[in-house]
Amino acid sequence: MTKEEVQGAEEEQQAQSKKALKKQQKEAEKAAKKAEKQAKLAAEQQSTEEDDFAKDRYGVSAMVQSQQKLDRALVRVQDLTPEKADQLIWLRARVHTSRAKGKQCFLVLRQQQFNVQALVAVGDRASKQMVKFAANITKESIVDVEASVRKVEQKIESCSQQDVELHIERIFVISQAEPRLPLQLEDAVRPDGEGEEEGRATVNQDTKLDNRVIDLRTTTSQAIFRLQSGVCQLFRDTLTKKGFVEIQTPKIISAASEGGANVFTVSYFKTSAYLAQSPQLYKQMCICADFDKVFCVGPVFRAEDSNTHRHLTEFVGLDIELAFNYHYHEVIDSITDTMVQIFKGLRDNFQTEIQTVNKQFPSEPFKFLEPTLRLEYIEALAMLRAAGVEMGDEDDLSTPNEKLLGRLVKEKYDTDFYVLDKYPLAVRPFYTMPDPNNPKYSNSYDMFMRGEEILSGAQRIHDAQLLTERAIHHQIDLEKIKAYIDSFRYGAPPHGGGGIGLERVCMLYLGLHNVRQTSMFPRDPKRLTP
Amino acid sequence: MSMYQQGNSCTSEHALQNGEVDPAVKALEARQDEIMRKLYELKAAVEGLAKTVTTPDADLDLTVSSSLSSQSFSSTTLKGTTDLDTLLGKDQGALRDIVVNANPAQPPLTLLVLHSLLSQRYRVLSTVHVHSSVSNVPPQLLSCLGPRHADSYARHMFQLGFTLIWKDVPKLEMKFSIQNMCPIKGEASVARFLFKLLAPYPSDPALATLVDSWVDTAFFQLAEGSAKERATVLRALNSALGRNPWLAGPEFSLADIACYCCVLQSGSMSSAPTNVQRWLKSCENLGHFGPAKLLLQ
């Protein structure tokens, strides 16, 4: 050891002992604080035992077991407007946040996507104990509140009801939330990136999905699923107006409808059955049974082990099938017009929901043309080739090429929705009608939203003879699809259709990046709960 | 000969009344119908020719041309051979689509006229769309490119696409090849582009400048100018048209299209001086200004 080193070691020791001293001091301080706190608590307890003039005005109510049927009118948070000023009202809501400050406690009460500020302050209505009780109500608990509505001078920016606040006179807890929440609502709605800068938490997707009940309470989730309900409603309304009939199709089927891969097998008494991959066969049978135009909304199952942002193993299919007179473009026109009506309905009636989602997930507004732009496959190839992509005439579009094409189309036509018509016959299923003029192509089409495929459809072969030929060409076991082919033996109208995934449409309309965000309880290869 | 047939057909009608069915009757009637049709066509053609007396350099108008042989007919209004492949590049088997974004508050009248001329020259697939940025577009704007082509289901059968999108744009814009071209802004610029697909620009630089200057005058002074400016332009038009049948000399050009549309738009049609009035008539006789005029009604 050199001298210097020895000196260094000594210094270190000294420093260590200094540290130890400090530590002791701190611990002593802590103990003192603890004692102080206990004393304070005892004092407080005493004070609670003291006479509390407001003790009937707050508390935890007995569990509602339908003991009595109160005729009490409850006001909705969204109806709290300046017109209600100075009225005494009852209200049921969740405690969104609470903040005690001396003799008063501020609460934010939430109902779905609406919230309002409320105040309990020591005065002739509320005692010190009542304020304390209010301050200790756990977040997310459900409370009944009697309060008078007051106009505020300055707008409350943090609440949806900006012009009024509530002065609480009674508060009862109806259902208590556990004090530790698996995730904080304000963290779950924080835009990506924003949290990082300020050192605040964001919630990852799996945590959100594991605790979906809480995650669904967020303003973003509320808006997404209200919009999704709107899509279904608009789909039904538009098609019903066009003379379509809504049908229900079986989900347990005896044979795989498309090919055979990607189906879930379920045990079915002594044999096995499959979960329907698409209602297509049944839609087509309804057309052969003279229903003319049909649609259905229901679950569709795909046993694809793909863990991507846009694949689910169970999703909601919106399916359309219709007979046409002379040209399958009648079918395209019908489907695209339905989509345009949905987009218009969303644009005109769901602006608040769209804005709410945009706050957390900013995206460009969805643009479309009416009537919808229709391009042919060879045009798409020409556009891609001009952009430097090398692909053969009869190659299918890869996902990156789909995306690129979407960008090129958007640049030229400024639309997020378009139809690509006349796919090569080789890349379509056997039941697709070949093009009458060019055997390389087919009467089939895909529809795209923001560069991602949402619908795949075609004119179907309605002639048993041709269908058999095409099935043989695709080397499909004729025995397995006998029932399908037989459906067309007794006269079948020319027809076509397609199916879209509800979750994908919502995701792409809102410009979200994961289909799990628009599926209420998503199912994918790695998730079967909740 | 016609009289002879007429007589013949009369006797056969008598025969028919007597209950005898003469197979020659039907053939004769068909021949008569055919001759009548040809006569009507001839009449229309003569009427068309009559127009050329008042319209210098004009050709038979559209209705006549379509009833005669539409294939062999080619416009002599605009001379010069133009080939889309040399003008726009090889098409690689896909439709060459010209996309025009226009604001419904300012319908581009010149482009409608040019569209009509283009449709006469090429097989043009015309489509009108409404962009989601605007709502409630009046029906006449939706049908301003005429009825749908019967073959519109097969896009590859057309030489040129003309896609008009009504959209909330501050200034009209055109997109063609997004890889090699930036968007072209302004109605006048787009009109110049489209006109070059119909006829080459005059090779004489003085003449080319003359055309350009009339186009500028039309868009800056007639369409956007004050009443005083408009009156000055009308006087200038009048004197120019006193010297020549068309604005840029002996041939119909973009100058005429632009000035016609802007006179129409500014509402000074009825108050125009004599030479201008005569010229307006001549333009109308060409048969391509109908859609533009219809839009302003």
Image: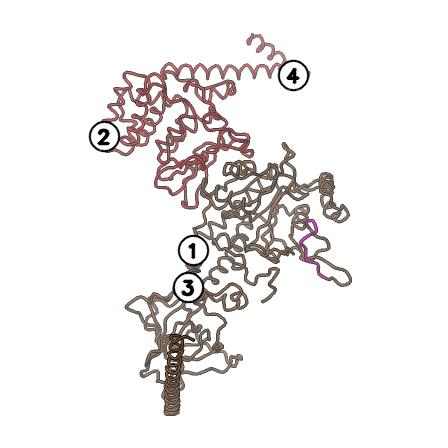
Q: Main secondary structure of the magenta part?
A: loop
Question: Which mark is in front, 3 or 4?
Answer: 3
Which chain's residue wears label 2?
A: B
Residue A374 on image: x %, y %: 52, 39
Mark 2 — residue? B229
Which chain's residue wears label 4?
A: B
- CA gap, disc 1 and disc 3: 15 Å
- CA gap, disc 3 and disc 2: 60 Å
Which chain's residue wears label 1?
A: A
Local SS, label 4: helix
Whether A209 is among the magenta residues is no
- CA gap, disc 4 and disc 2: 73 Å
Q: Identify the residue at horizontal 44%, vertical 14% (top origin).
A: B46
Q: Nearer the viewer, residue A136 or A321?
A: A136
Residue A359 is left or right of residue A379, and the answer is left
Quarter occupied by the C terminus of chain A: bottom right
Assess disc 2: are there few (<14), some (14-19) or many (≥20) residues with their C-alpha within 10 Å of its C-alpha.
Answer: some
Q: Is residue B293 visible?
A: no
Mark 1 — residue? A362
Q: Earlier in the sequence, mark 4 or mark 2?
A: 4
Indicate the quadrant where residue B50 lies. top left
Are the two marked residues, 3 and 2, in contact with CB atoms closer than 8 angstroms? no
Q: Identify the residue at horizontal 63%, vertical 33% (top origin).
A: A438
Which chain is depicted brown? A
Q: Nearer the viewer, residue B59 or A401?
A: A401
Assess disc 1: are there few (<14), some (14-19) or many (≥20) residues with their C-alpha within 10 Å of its C-alpha.
Answer: some
Mark 3 — residue? A195
> Which residues, given as a range, are shown in magenta?
A258-266
- CA gap, disc 1 and disc 2: 49 Å
